[in-house]
Image: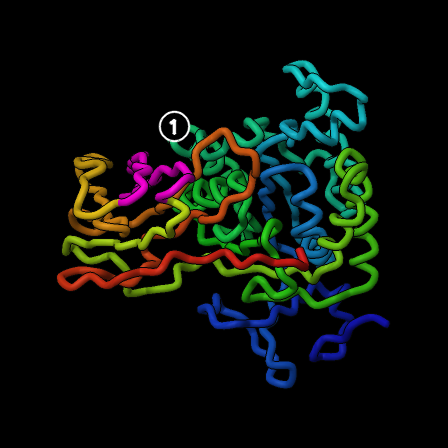
């Protein structure tokens, strides 16, 4: 049966998005007192811009959201950062080959582009509203660290489409491409001076309730999403059961606002203290990545963590970082990052390449999401990414 909105209308056709709230600040929603949900509508003048790190992310994370927007008459555009061409095991299986060279990867990426266009056609998005940036698969962290070129490209996409809503990866997603794209998009949206509503999604590390806002279930939309996912035949060939299980979960989204409005934003010097687990010190090699933003000016730094068997005392790892704005020290088993003046941006403990396992244990974190630490800094526990068996 079709789902009814609070006014008796069929919510699957009227463009009403029912979202369950779990504690973040609302961005001007109507409240349904009976259901205790927040309702977001897509008017005909609405414009949804979806950013996907790889082909199939758009369907897994936003397949029903796209349909909801299209049913309301809203414009939808999807932008893919990479072609998902660094995907050797399905390619080896499909093409019966062991060696994957440059030409083979390019061919695989072209195939995945075609699958993405076919999937989006099932969701109601025409091919002329699909964009492919062609960036390096598993290379988005490097692109974020290199310069502002990628951020400028994303800002141009935002300005060109002028979205009312942007769906993009969450900082909590465990795939490094997803987290890096989120950082670049937050910087790009700020650079474009966009006032869009940001909806963050998790693909890798997701539970059935991994966001503040939950899209209401709708059987017709779900079946269409499932059909769209099957168009990604290159991924279905080895992972059909897993991908269909992911697609069966309700779509949920986070708001894009920092957790703390009273975060590190004053003119006083600030300090972050991040305790390091023994695994960082004993055998895993890690770097500290910093991305600081001051208006349109973006500074970056990478500092290697030592790997001693035991560490006591104080050791300076880097000074004068990010145009003299940051100092990184290791004090006993705690990482100490001191900022001169206010600090807005991002920090990550990055496991060094090469990787046998793609996914991150520690993901990017906004500096402003840490409690403000000034004269009497306190310990800040790193965010633990939950291991979600129902992925």
Check if residue 25 falls in the magenta segment: no
Instruction: Mark 1: give few (<14), some (14-19) or many (20+) Cα within 10 Å.
Output: few
Q: Which residue is drawn at 49% across and 36% down?
A: 154
- Where is the C terminus found, in terms of image quarters? bottom right
Q: In this view, does 180 lie to the left or right of 74?
A: left
Q: Residue 124, how many percent across, how many down?
A: 76, 46
Above or below residue 370? Residue 47 is above
| Residue receiving disc 1 | 146
Residue 305 belongs to magenta span: yes
Horizontal side of residue 170 vs 107, given as left or right: left
* Res 360 seen here: yes
Residue numbers of the magenta segment: 281-310
Q: How many labels does the image show?
A: 1
Q: Nearer the viewer, residue 343 or 154?
A: 343
SS at circle 1: helix
Q: Identify the residue at image location x=76%, y=75%.
A: 4
């Amino acid at each position: 049966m079709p789902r009814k909105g609070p006014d008796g209308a069929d919510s699957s056709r009227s463009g009403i998005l029912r979202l369950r709230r779990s504690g973040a600040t609302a961005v001007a929603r109507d409240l349904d007192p009976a259901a205790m949900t927040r309702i977001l509508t897509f008017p005909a003048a609405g414009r949804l811009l979806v950013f996907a790190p790889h082909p199939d992310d758009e369907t897994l994370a936003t397949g029903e959201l796209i349909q909801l927007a299209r049913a309301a008459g809203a414009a939808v555009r999807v932008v893919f950062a990479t072609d998902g061409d660094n995907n050797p095991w399905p390619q080896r299986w499909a093409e019966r080959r062991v060696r994957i060279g440059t030409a083979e990867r390019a061919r695989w990426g072209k195939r995945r582009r075609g699958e993405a266009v076919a999937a989006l056609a099932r969701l109601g998005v025409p091919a002329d509203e699909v964009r492919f940036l062609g960036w390096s698969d598993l290379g988005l962290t490097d692109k974020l660290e290199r310069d502002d070129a990628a951020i400028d490209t994303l800002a141009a996409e935002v300005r060109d489409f002028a979205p009312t809503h942007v769906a993009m990866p969450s900082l909590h997603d465990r795939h490094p491409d997803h987290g890096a794209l989120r950082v670049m998009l937050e910087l790009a949206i700020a650079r474009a001076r966009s006032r869009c509503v940001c909806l963050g999604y998790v693909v890798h590390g997701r539970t059935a309730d991994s966001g503040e806002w939950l899209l209401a279930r709708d059987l017709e939309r779900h079946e269409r999403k499932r059909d769209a996912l099957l168009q990604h035949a290159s991924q279905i060939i080895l992972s059909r059961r897993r991908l269909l299980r992911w697609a069966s979960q309700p779509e949920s989204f986070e708001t894009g606002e920092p957790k703390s409005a009273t975060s590190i934003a004053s003119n006083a010097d600030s300090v972050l203290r991040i305790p390091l687990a023994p695994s960082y010190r004993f055998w895993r090699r890690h770097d500290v990545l910093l991305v600081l933003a001051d208006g349109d000016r973006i500074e970056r730094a990478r500092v290697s963590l030592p790997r001693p068997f035991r560490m006591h005392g104080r050791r300076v790892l880097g000074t004068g970082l990010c145009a003299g704005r940051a100092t990184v020290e290791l004090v006993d088993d705690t990482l100490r990052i001191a900022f001169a003046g206010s600090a807005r941006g991002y920090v990550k403990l990055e496991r060094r390449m090469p990787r046998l396992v793609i996914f991150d244990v520690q993901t990017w974190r906004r500096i402003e999401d840490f409690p403000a630490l000034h004269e009497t800094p306190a310990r800040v526990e790193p965010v633990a990414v939950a291991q979600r068996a129902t992925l």
